[in-house]
Image (cartoon, rainbow, N blue to C red):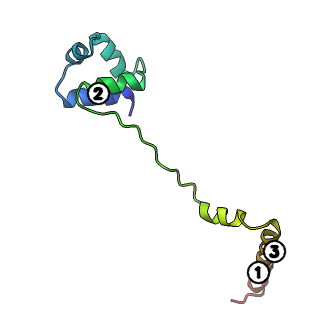
Amino acid sequence: MTAGELLRDARRRHGLTQRQLAIRARTSQAAISRIERDVVSPTVETLGGLLWMMNEQLVIDATPVEWGFDVELIKSRLALSPEERLRRGVAHSRRMNQIRGVVQRGGA
């Protein structure tokens, strides 16, 4: 949703015309129209102020991104010494080679 769409939706929810909102904001109807049509991009402060005049609050939110890996697992592995990480890597490689051998022989 753009800033213009947000402002237009809020204004319509409150039953105001662009002119009425402009009067409250001490600006022109044309200025409100330019924002609503996304001709200009208002600052967060301006958009928040216009919404505030309609008893609404601008809320900007952020949410964590799920990258698909276990951050705690990575942290625990990095806490290991380089020697321990190498030892575990070699052990893992050996297990994978054993599994590969079983699969190639057709066993379970």
- Of callouts 2 and 3, which one flags the residue occurring earlier in the amino acid sequence? 2
Amino acid tagged 2: Leu
As displayed, is residue 10 above or below residue 75? above
Which residue is the site of mark 3? 87
Which residue is the site of mark 2? 51
Which residue shows up at 42% across the image and 17% down it?
40
Q: Can residue 46 be seen from the camera position used here?
A: yes
Which residue shows up at 41% across the image and 26% down it?
44
Q: CA distance from mark 1 to mark 2?
A: 62 Å
- Of callouts 3 and 1, which one flags the residue occurring earlier in the amino acid sequence? 3
- In front: 85, or 20? 85
User: Based on the displayed image, in which of its 4 quarters is residue 10 positioned?
Assistant: top left
Which residue is the site of mark 1? 95
Left or right: residue 69 versus residue 20 is: right
Left or right: residue 24 versus residue 82 is: left
Marker disc for residue 23: none
Residue 13 in picture, x, y percent from top left: 20, 31
Amino acid tagged 1: Arg
> Please, what secondary structure does the residue beneath circle 1 have?
helix
Query: Are circles 1 and 2 on residues that touch, CB within 8 Å?
Result: no
Which residue shows up at 76% across the image and 76% down it?
92
Q: Residues within 10 Å of mark 1 (few under 14, many from 20)?
A: few
